[in-house]
Amino acid sequence: MSSKPSSSSAAPSPVRAPLKPLDVALAELLAHALPLPGLETVSTFDADGRVLAHDVRASLDVPGHDNSSMDGYAVRCADWLDAGTLLSVSQRIPAGGSGQALAANSAARIFTGAPIPPGADAVVMQEDCEAVDAGVRLRVQPQPGQWIRRRGEDVASGGVVLARGQRLNPASIGLAASIGFDTLSVAPRVRVALFSTGDELVMPGEVAPADMLPGAIYNSNRFFLRALLKRLGCVVSDMGIVPDRLDATMNALQSASQQHDLILTSGGVSVGEEDHIKPAVEALGKLTLWQLAIKPGKPFAYGQLGAAHFIGLPGNPVSSFVTFLLLVRPFILKLQGASQVAPESIALPAHFDWAKADKRREFLRVRRNAAGGLDLFNNQSSGVLTSAVWGDGLVDNPAGQTIAHGDSVRFIPFSELMA
């Protein structure tokens, strides 16, 4: 006679930790991201994308003198009589030259960037003048200060022009050059070890599509993660694909932890029998495995192996892509000492309906349309990387929220997340 075990003798189901809100997870993650020590001095030519380690302070005014913003004639407004006012031309002032004090009832032929001569209080652009043998005739009445760029109106001597923690762009490195900086002090680059896990992964070029074995997939994550890291100025060591074995995973992690600031993996952070990242990191250091309350991108891991940080991303391509943008990007920026790590978002109307409210915060792939609204990609699966190519940003949709056509939604452009 057989008997079934009573319900009281059955092993209790493990209690799952509640899903962690994204904002809480990001705050905890950033708390670990202490700026890397040291700095580098680089040519201003090569500073694009780097983070300033010190304030950049001006030691001169820009412009250094009142100058003309137009080709035309420098005049004294008091000399204007009427639309036929005729002034003699007493001098010619090119950019880089200098002029004499302007006599009454005279004008100075002047060119863009040239210093305003003493006594002149306006510039009349050449289109509003008529050159005649006796001088120049003014067709319009000059107004005090017109077409004059004042000394120091762009940069005042002694002021901070670029602040420490600012991430440099082409405009800011041009501004640094305009006040004489040929080199800049910047934060060191983050050294990142990148590898993927999974016996199913195949590198493009190694196997032709027609020869792919059942279950095999090309390793796309390795390509877009490397590109995203490069855009952030990281020094990337590509560690390749690690086999689904605990010993191989431990060896790869141990090696990577020696000379890198961050180890970044994709895949293997779940709890399956072939997911070896968790036990490997726990054996070598410490690990916090988070289940995030976001879609896509629930499985996420943070840990430390000696002095190196570890971040494990989910294996599904869109999940890995989105969690990098939302969590890894600000983490890396903070390691570089950046003062601004959060992306800017804008409110735009949804030109779609989203009737499937989820208990998790969702990041929907969308793109702007000619009418000023947002269209939704038709397949929001975490495995459909096409959605990230078709789209130009994400809708940050709160948990439990449906969207009706015309609703205002929070849009985060990819230009903010991938710069």
Image (cartoon, rainbow, N blue to C red):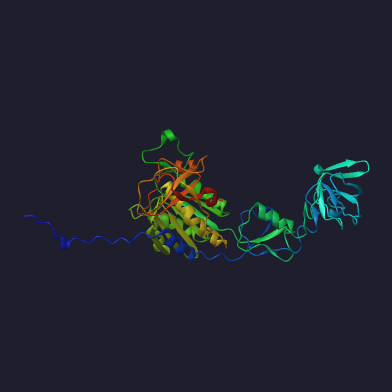
Asked if residue 347 lies left or right of residue 198, the reply is right
> Which residue corresponds to the image point at 41% horizontal and 63% vertical from the top-left?
287
Expressed as whole percent of the image width and height from the top left, the position of residue 405 reads 42, 44
Classify residue 169 as left or right of residue 206. Answer: right
- Taking the spot 44% from the left edge, 60% from the top edge, the residue there is 23
Q: Quadrant of the N terminus?
A: bottom left
Tell me if residue 57 comes above or below residue 252 in the rendering: below
- What is the residue that sits farthest to the front in this orientation? 82
Residue 196 appears in the figure: no
The front one of 75 and 191 is: 75
- Based on the displayed image, in which of its 4 quarters is residue 248 positioned? bottom left
Residue 14: x %, y % from top left:
27, 61
Extreme residue in the right direction: 134
Picture coordinates of residue 31 (x, y %)?
48, 66
> Number of callouts in the render?
0
Q: Is residue 144 left or right of residue 101?
A: left
Q: Between residue 365 and residue 70, name the one nearer to us.
A: 70
- Is residue 128 or residue 99 the one in the foreground? 128
> Is any atom of residue 397 visible in this view?
yes
Residue that lies at the very extreme toward the top in this rendered image? 210
